Amino acid sequence: MPTRPSSKPLKTAGCTPLNVENIEMMAQMMFSVSEMSAMCHCKTRHIREDPELMEAVERGQGKARAALRRRQWTEAMNGQPTMLIWLGKQYLDQKDKTIESVDENDLVRAILEARRVMQTAPQAEPDEPEAPRLLS
């Protein structure tokens, strides 16, 4: 399919003109190609088969992803816990720890051991907080 100059929009009555600038703007709002074609009253293939328009789609969606990433990073650096957790999972390979099955006997033994440690632990003075202890 021959390409057409970006300065000469496809003529469509009562809709968004099909040109590089409008396609890039819609792509920055993460419109799909299908949604863009609906707004421009054209077939999706008119956009998909035009290299210049597809570059505008990629450029606009790239700008949208970058803006979203900046906002997420800002929220995380401001201490927003959900964003810190999400970014940790995405970039640091962090995962939620799940326990698939717990043996009842192991659970009882752990509780009894915790009670024993707490009963034998020396009492802290009221002005001095007790340091956390690890179970061994």
Image: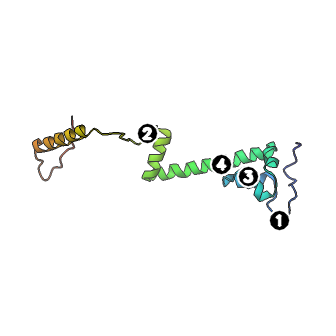
As measured in the structure, the alpha-carbon distance from the residue carrying label 4 to the one carrying label 1 is 28 Å
Give the residue displayed 51% in from the left and 51% down from the top.
74
As measured in the structure, the alpha-carbon distance from the residue carrying label 2 to the one carrying label 1 is 50 Å
Give the SS element for disc 2: loop
Q: Earlier in the sequence, mark 2 or mark 1?
A: 1
Whether residue 16 is visible = yes
Residue 63 image label: 4
Give the SS element for disc 1: loop
Give the residue displayed 83% in from the left and 65% down from the top.
14
Identified by mark 1, the residue type is: Gly
Q: Nearer the viewer, mark 4 or mark 3?
A: 3
Which sits in the foreground, 133 or 1? 1
Q: Earlier in the sequence, mark 4 or mark 3?
A: 3
Q: Earlier in the sequence, mark 3 or mark 2?
A: 3
Q: Tell me if mark 2 has few (under 14), some (14-19) or many (20+) residues whose alpha carbon lies within 10 angstroms of its own.
A: few
Q: Nearer the viewer, mark 3 or mark 1?
A: 3
Q: Is 41 on the left-hand or right-hand side of 89? A: right
Q: Quadrant location of residue 120?
A: top left
Q: Nearer the viewer, mark 3 or mark 2?
A: 3
As measured in the structure, the alpha-carbon distance from the residue carrying label 4 to the one carrying label 2 is 27 Å
Give the residue displayed 33% in from the left and 39% down from the top.
101
Name the residue carrying label 1: 14
Residue at the limit of the structure toward the top, as seen here:
136
Q: Could you tell me if the residues under marks 4 and 3 are in contact, i.e. CB atoms within 8 Å?
A: no
Q: Nearer the viewer, mark 4 or mark 1?
A: 1
Q: Tell me if mark 1 has few (under 14), some (14-19) or many (20+) residues whose alpha carbon lies within 10 angstroms of its own.
A: few
Q: Is 36 on the left-hand or right-hand side of 95? A: right
Q: Earlier in the sequence, mark 3 or mark 1?
A: 1
Whether residue 133 is visible = no
